[in-house]
Image (tube, grey):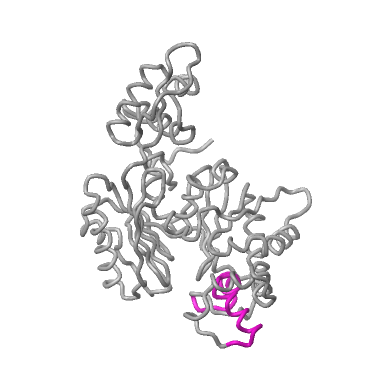
């Protein structure tokens, strides 16, 4: 039983039940499409007249559409419903340490158009580039774009829309949400990249993830971030600072420095940068970052190169140490590993699971460890989810 937070509680209004029913109907269409009004009525026990009123409203808002007739069960053939696929509805901005991606998507989360450019460490210049890109997309789709979602690799205060601290660029207390909203005239939501990807897994991930009430997303990139889902909602903690497990101590003398400067953090042992450093040490190469990236390392490993495989397996071992701590502490149903490293799952799965299995006491529940299915740019899907999740339900927790 969840205790009511009186500081944030709002009294129920006359339209509360109507709003809840509206979300139920929209989510039935999303999850079961194509589906008829009669089937929704049977599944929800809502009156047919109530369903028809809600469906008419959702159609007028451009959220669902009719797609022909279904099979008859003895009477008239039912009219089938699905999410409206035509046209973009959201803009996502994924700010990453090296590249920034801006894209539009439809209601189902399918990317329609996108562009990317190098991430500028100068905050003012970075925001000017982002605003210009958002304006280009919004001008092309004036009638349909509803909002913008932004992800950053750092701490975010969701109450103010400020980036508290982004270590890769040394940004502090930057009002990203307000700047983009003022310049574009669109509502803007900003969040940490790992939180956003966890939200995307909740709404667009594989079934064993979307069906789980509690899971943890591990986002492996230039750093290591975690997004925590508890009871179907993102857990952010005080001022959005929950989930900074990339800075927990797992060893000493890591192959690279953490973004915070230390050499004992989980990130320093388990990030893409750590894997690349191990590979260069094994090959005795002094390769520059722009001549050997993590995707190339995975390609070499998948093609059978021993040094590349060894570098990934050692990185997975340390990744497993951190995950085992989270499994013991949170006991989630599922742990999802996201980022480019998921492409090498066949090579790293055993190193991950062996480490985790050793840490969980016999008889206690463990978690399923699965790779993300969000693709090569999960942060972008996360940015879009900041907009799309609000269409389908209350996805945010205090």
Q: Is residue 272 magenta?
A: yes
The correct choice, above or below, for 297 with respect to 13 in the image is below
Indicate the position of residue 76 as horizontal and vertical percent values: 42, 14
Instruction: Give the main secondary structure of the magenta stretch.
Output: helix
Q: Is residue 201 left or right of residue 7?
A: right
Task: Tell me: residue 163, above or below residue 79.
Answer: below
Q: Position of residue 134 (x, y in %)?
A: 27, 59
Quarter of the image where one finds residue 11: top left
Where's residue 294, x and y in %? 54, 72
The residue shown at (64%, 71%) is 301
Q: How many marks?
A: 0
Query: In the image, is 47 to the left or to the right of 247?
Result: left
Q: Which residue occupies 56% across, 70% down?
A: 271
**Residue drawn at point x = 64 percent, y = 78 percent:** 252
Q: Quadrant of the N terminus?
A: top right
Magenta residues span 260-285
């Amino acid at each position: 039983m969840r205790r009511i937070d009186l500081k944030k509680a709002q009294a129920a209004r006359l339209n509360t039940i109507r709003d809840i029913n509206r979300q139920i109907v929209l989510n039935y269409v999303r999850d079961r499409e194509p589906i008829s009004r009669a089937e929704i009525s049977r599944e929800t026990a809502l009156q047919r007249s109530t369903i028809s009123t809600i469906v008419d409203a959702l159609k007028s808002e451009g959220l669902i559409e009719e797609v022909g007739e279904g099979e008859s069960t003895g009477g008239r053939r039912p009219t089938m419903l699905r999410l409206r696929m035509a046209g973009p509805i959201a803009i996502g901005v994924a700010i990453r340490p090296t590249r920034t991606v801006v894209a539009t998507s439809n209601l189902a989360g399918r990317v329609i158009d996108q562009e990317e450019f190098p991430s500028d460490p100068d905050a003012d210049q970075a925001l000017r580039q982002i605003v210009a890109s958002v304006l280009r997309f919004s001008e092309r789709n004036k009638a349909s774009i509803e909002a913008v979602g932004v992800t950053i690799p750092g701490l975010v205060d969701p109450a103010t829309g400020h980036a508290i601290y982004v270590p890769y660029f040394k940004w502090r207390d930057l009002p990203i949400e307000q700047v983009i909203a003022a310049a574009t005239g669109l509502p803007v939501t900003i969040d940490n990249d790992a939180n956003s990807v966890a939200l995307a897994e909740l709404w667009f991930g594989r079934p064993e993830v979307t069906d789980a009430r509690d899971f943890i997303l591990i986002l492996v990139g230039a750093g290591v971030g975690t997004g925590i889902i508890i009871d179907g909602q993102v857990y952010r903690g005080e001022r959005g600072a929950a989930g900074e497990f990339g800075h927990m101590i797992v060893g000493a003398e890591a192959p690279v420095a953490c973004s915070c400067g230390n050499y004992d953090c989980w990130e320093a042992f388990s990030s893409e940068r750590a894997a690349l450093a191990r590979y260069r040490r094994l090959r005795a190469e002094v390769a520059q970052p722009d001549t050997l990236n993590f995707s190339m390392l995975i390609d070499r490993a998948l093609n059978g190169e021993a040094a590349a495989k060894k570098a990934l397996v050692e990185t997975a071992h340390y990744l497993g140490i951190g995950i085992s701590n989270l499994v013991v502490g949170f006991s989630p149903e599922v742990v999802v590993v996201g980022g480019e490293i998921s492409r090498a799952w066949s090579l790293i799965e055993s190193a991950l699971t062996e480490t985790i299995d050793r840490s969980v006491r016999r008889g206690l529940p463990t978690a399923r460890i699965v790779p993300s299915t969000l693709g090569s740019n999960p942060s972008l899907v996360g940015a879009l989810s900041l907009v799309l999740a609000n269409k389908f339900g209350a996805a945010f927790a205090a």
